Image (cartoon, helix red, strand yellow):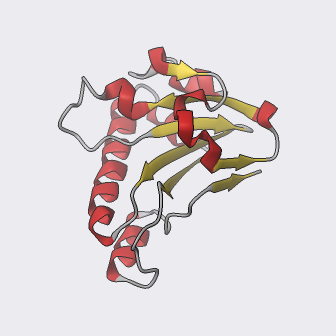
Amino acid sequence: MPFQEVFEHTEVAACLSPGLQALEQYATLIVREDTRALEGSVDIDACLRERYPQQHRWDYAFGYRARLYYVEVHHVSDSEVRVVIAKYQWLKDWQNSQPNPAALKLNSSYHWLSSGKGTLTKNSRYVRSLISAGLDYPPRELRIG
């Protein structure tokens, strides 16, 4: 299902953007083979800030070659792992609250990207809890193809 159709009946429908425009300065963190294959993007955090002001909201989603990518751009440190896991759980709960949650999850992947240098040790208990939650160690960029 195309990106626009997946999100057209959700709370973020009014915030859909072409290409990676919703990611603004963070669009450079997405390394892709074909820019024409980008289907659109949405800044989930900005779009839902007023509706969920006290929640840990996930940052972005974008479509590329019939896949959905959910991206959180966040500082990397041991102390931020719990925050990112909370954002990830919020995203899952939000998806389940929307019409057709299965479409929001189909062919999707979830990524925490580093917004700069960090202090997260690859073999720490924090990384193990991150992986246990369903996320990987945060790279500096996301390579898609």
The answer to whether residue 1 is visible is no
Write down the quadrant of residue 18 in the picture: top right
Q: Residue at x 51, y 54 (%)?
A: 111
Image position of 34 with respect to 134: above or below:
above
The answer to whether residue 45 is visible is yes
Q: Position of residue 112 (x, y in %)?
A: 47, 56
Residue farthest toward the top in the current orientation of the protein: 14
Residue farthest toward the left in the current orientation of the protein: 54
Q: Nearer the viewer, residue 99 or 23?
A: 23
Looking at the image, residue 124 sits to the left or right of residue 144; the answer is: left
Q: Position of residue 67 (x, y in %)?
A: 66, 41
Looking at the image, residue 105 sits to the left or right of residue 19; the answer is: left
Q: Residue at x 27, y 62 (%)?
A: 82
Q: Position of residue 16 (x, y in %)?
A: 53, 21
Q: Residue at x 56, y 60 (%)?
A: 140
Q: Quadrant of the N terminus?
A: top right
Image position of 112 with respect to 137: above or below:
above
Q: Position of residue 40 (x, y in %)?
A: 63, 27
Q: Residue at x 30, y 45 (%)?
A: 90
